[in-house]
Image: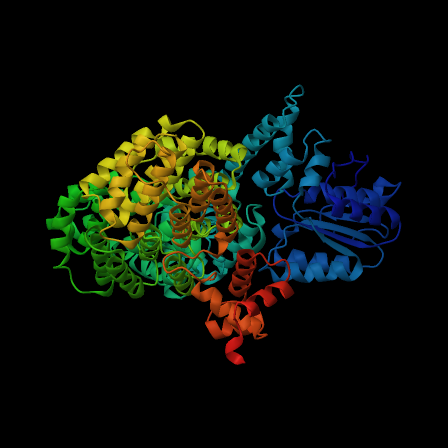
């Protein structure tokens, strides 16, 4: 029997509430025999805690303390037995018998090994007579307390992450902090502490058995520590495997569910060796694949760690096909890293990256594909690279990629090359790719690409109706956007807008919404453009405010909408601010066929704020692009109308003439151009006044007709301005008054203008919703009937209210009934 003559110093239990609670219990029960058990992992402080508990239980008589496993302690003794997990089974049985004595106090401490049955029996005996505490890791508040508030919450949290809350590791970090008493910067203190903790991890791991280290590596690979897995990888029998699992869990490096401490990954690799870590991970993957227990997250982690295996790749490919959003991209990336064939992975990974706006990943896939010796992989890389370039607003790069590839190597990507090259104004190269596209296999995707290419080609040579037909057929063949430089639905909307057919544009938007419940940012911005062109400035502004453009193409469109809405509202302050916000995007802008609308609107804004020089190079580039494409009426008409407006805003009638002349030529091809040409001639006469010799005076009816036609074809704002300008220039008071009334009528009727065929205030889909709304159907019932969600119905109703200016639901229903909706049921 060994007794302690002096009371030991009180151990530091700061930040350890369970330990202090146990000491309080022991103090209150001093002199009353009891049993206490304190268990934890290495470094958790069990020795310090049992010392404090035993001292408290001994009360004022430290001579009662007996250390070690006594044979037959005296009544009233306080037996203190540490490291009980190291005792053999016979000793554990003796200790359990000792605990059962009611005339002594027994305080034991050690590791709670899961696979030691006698140890579990001892725990049961202690719990029957007293209390067992399993020491939990220190928390952030506990570290703050233990540091005597030298560390605040942020630094303490960093210490917890680095140490896993292990008391010994925490104390190593706090010792490093204490060595710098004058330092106050919390980030510096956190760095000092974490560096010391990392060094301790390394030292502790070096002292562990090689097989225990391998077991920890198994846990670090994400595997569950079951005896079969450990036995197979460590090449030991089942009993030894169980002992290794116990030792690994007692080491202080495993947390809940056997998760390995992240901060100790590097020290473990340094101690064991990177080769051994990789070998263990590969073995874990093989075993889990063989037993069909490898989760998708585990497979991703394995691939990211550098493991390449056919079955691992196959598992990830299957999982990627079912994934969505950013998760889909992560799984495809892992499948690629695991060795899945590039021909399978690259299209899907690039598609997922483009859908989630991660152009960095898409660019990496493209660049790696371009270095391949397989022409098919190279052509796919060109397609991906061109799609990225289009989103970045650099069609020159997209065209460069296809020229480098050449039509002879393009294969099934030739049709995409046609679109990219025409967007950049290279009609000659596009013709070569169009010829090559005709020999591509007639798959559904190739057919969709070819129809889109045919539509763009037709838009340069024929009417918009012919072009739109091909584009819509392309849209029907492919419900997703795919890896395209341009989405077919967006091209169809652009063709309709460029033709003044806002009703057709809205119809495409509605149709696309059925196929894709979550439209792209660009699709939403084009929807805003339709609203702005139709005079619904509130709806346009709402849409712009609801999206977050990331890529240059979308940013250019969003800035153009912002200045366009401000200009139409006559808000010069907002216009100036919107123009200044757009300047960086404008400076970076390139010209392409599909960017004429935003470039034109930004041109007008620049003229309006007196900063036209900032756009002059882009205006010249548009002229060269259209010239290279033979000034196609479908695309050039809207641009020349921007030119007319720029001349008017800049008070330069001479600059208006060439654009008016171009509109006159285009008028022979399209009714939209004819309307704009007539309006341009009238506006020029308004500006010239009576200075045109031998010309009859301009009548109020001519101005009214031109203004009204502009409203019908989606230019209500311009029509109102023309009427107002004419009222100021015409000499007759009665005619001037009439024109002012025309300007007011057109200005307030803007939201009802639908373009093209004139007439309806609502799109086809909105009209369907309005009809059923008047009939008393709920949003859910309307959605079910039209195969759209109730939320989409709500969105349509909100737009109808804004379009009609209704202030309440009852007013909306009254206005719809007055307009004839719901009459079919009567």
Q: Quadrant of the C terminus?
A: bottom right
Q: Front-most of 365 and 729? A: 729
Q: Residue furthest top?
A: 182
Q: Position of residue 154 (x, y in %)?
A: 64, 35
Which residue is at a point 40% across and 46% down the rendered structure image?
A: 703
**Which coloring applies here?**
rainbow
Apparent side of residue 223 relative to residue 17 in the rendered image (left or right) = left
Q: How many marks?
A: 0
Q: Position of residue 603 (x, y in %)?
A: 37, 35
Which residue is at a point 48% across and 70% down the rendered structure image?
A: 768
Rendering quarter of residue 656: top left
Q: Front-most of 730 and 798? A: 730
Q: Position of residue 34 (x, y in %)?
A: 82, 55
Q: Residue furthest bottom?
A: 826
> Does residue 822 appear in the picture of this structure?
yes
Q: Position of residue 628 (x, y in %)?
A: 18, 40
Q: Front-most of 745 and 622? A: 745
Above or below residue 752? Residue 767 is below
> Does residue 384 appear in the picture of this structure?
no
Apparent side of residue 628 relative to residue 232 in the rendered image (left or right) = left
Q: Quadrant of the N terminus?
A: top right
Rendering quarter of residue 157: top right
Rendering quarter of residue 5: top right
Apparent side of residue 258 relative to residue 345 in the rendered image (left or right) = right
Q: Front-most of 109 and 718? A: 718
């Amino acid at each position: 029997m060994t007794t302690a003559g002096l009371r030991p110093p009180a151990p530091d239990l700061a930040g350890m509430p369970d330990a202090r609670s146990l000491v309080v219990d022991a103090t209150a029960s001093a002199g009353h025999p009891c049993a206490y058990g304190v268990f934890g992992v290495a470094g958790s402080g069990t020795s310090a805690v049992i010392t404090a508990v035993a001292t408290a239980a001994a009360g004022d008589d430290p001579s009662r303390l007996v250390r070690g496993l006594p044979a037959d302690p005296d009544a009233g003794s306080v037996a203190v037995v540490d490291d009980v997990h190291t005792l053999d089974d016979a000793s554990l049985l003796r200790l359990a018998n000792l605990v059962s004595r009611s005339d002594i106090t027994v305080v034991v401490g050690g590791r709670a090994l899961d696979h030691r049955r006698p140890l579990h029996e001892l725990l049961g005996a202690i719990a029957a007579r007293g209390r067992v505490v399993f020491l939990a890791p220190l928390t952030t508040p506990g570290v703050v307390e233990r540091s005597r508030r030298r560390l605040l919450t942020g630094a303490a949290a960093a210490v917890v992450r680095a140490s896993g809350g292990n008391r010994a590791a925490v104390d190593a970090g706090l010792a490093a902090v204490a060595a710098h008493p004058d330092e106050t910067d919390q980030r510096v203190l956190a760095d000092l502490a974490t560096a010391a903790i990392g060094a301790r991890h390394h030292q502790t791991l070096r002292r562990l058995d090689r097989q225990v280290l391998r077991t920890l590596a198994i846990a670090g690979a994400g595997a569950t520590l079951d005896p079969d897995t450990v036995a197979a990888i460590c090449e030991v029998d089942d009993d030894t495997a169980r002992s290794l699992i116990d030792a690994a869990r007692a080491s202080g490096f495993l947390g809940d569910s056997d998760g390995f401490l992240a901060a100790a990954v590097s020290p473990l690799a340094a101690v064991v060796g990177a080769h051994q870590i990789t070998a263990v991970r590969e073995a874990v993957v093989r075993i889990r694949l063989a037993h069909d227990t490898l989760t998708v997250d585990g497979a991703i982690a394995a691939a990211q760690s550098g493991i390449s295996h056919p079955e691992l790749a196959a598992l990830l490919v299957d999982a990627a096909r079912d994934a969505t959003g950013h998760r889909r991209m992560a799984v495809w990336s892992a499948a690629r890293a695991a060795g899945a064939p590039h021909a399978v992975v690259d299209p899907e990974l690039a598609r997922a990256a483009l859908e989630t706006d991660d152009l960095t990943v898409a660019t990496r896939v493209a660049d790696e594909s371009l270095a391949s010796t397989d022409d098919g992989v190279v052509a796919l890389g060109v397609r991906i690279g061109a799609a990225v370039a289009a989103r970045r607003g650099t069609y020159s790069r997209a065209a460069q990629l296809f020229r480098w590839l050449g039509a002879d190597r393009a294969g099934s990507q030739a049709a995409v090359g046609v679109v990219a090259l025409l967007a950049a104004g290279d009609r000659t190269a596009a013709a070569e790719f169009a010829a090559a596209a005709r020999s591509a296999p007639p798959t559904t995707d190739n057919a969709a690409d070819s129809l889109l290419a045919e539509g763009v080609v037709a838009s340069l040579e024929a009417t918009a109706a012919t072009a739109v037909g091909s584009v819509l057929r392309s849209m029907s063949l492919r419900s997703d956007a795919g890896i395209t430089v341009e989405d077919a639905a967006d091209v169809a909307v652009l063709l309709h807008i460029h033709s003044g057919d806002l009703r057709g544009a809205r119809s495409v938007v509605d149709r696309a919404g059925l196929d894709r419940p979550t439209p792209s940012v660009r699709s939403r911005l084009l929807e805003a453009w339709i609203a702005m062109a139709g005079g619904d400035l509130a709806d346009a502004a709402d849409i712009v405010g609801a999206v977050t453009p990331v890529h240059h193409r979308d940013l250019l469109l969003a800035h153009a909408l912002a200045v366009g809405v401000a200009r139409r509202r006559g808000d010069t302050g907002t216009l100036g601010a919107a123009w200044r916000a757009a300047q960086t995007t404008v400076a970076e802008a390139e010209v392409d066929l599909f960017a004429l609308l935003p470039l034109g609107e930004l041109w007008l804004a620049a003229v309006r704020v007196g900063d036209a020089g900032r756009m002059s190079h882009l205006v010249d580039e548009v002229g060269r692009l259209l010239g290279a494409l033979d000034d196609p009426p479908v695309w050039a008409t809207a641009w020349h109308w921007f030119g007319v407006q720029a001349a008017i805003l800049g008070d330069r009638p001479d600059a208006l003439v060439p654009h008016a002349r171009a509109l006159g030529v285009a008028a022979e091809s399209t009714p939209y151009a004819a309307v704009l040409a007539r309006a341009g001639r009238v506006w020029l006469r308004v500006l010239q006044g009576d200075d045109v010799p031998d010309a009859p005076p301009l009548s109020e009816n001519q101005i009214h007709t031109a203004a009204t036609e502009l409203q019908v074809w989606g230019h209500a704002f311009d029509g109102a301005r023309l009427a107002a300008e004419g009222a100021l220039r015409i000499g007759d008071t009665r005619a001037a008054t009439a024109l002012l009334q025309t300007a007011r009528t057109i200005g307030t009727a803007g939201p009802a203008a639908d373009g093209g065929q004139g007439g309806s205030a609502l799109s086809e889909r909105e009209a369907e919703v309005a009809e059923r709304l008047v009939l008393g159907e709920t949003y859910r019932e309307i959605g079910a009937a039209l195969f759209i969600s109730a939320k989409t119905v709500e969105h349509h109703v909100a737009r109808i209210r804004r379009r009609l200016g209704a202030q309440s639901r009852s007013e909306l229903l009254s206005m719809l009934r007055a307009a004839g909706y719901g009459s079919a049921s009567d």
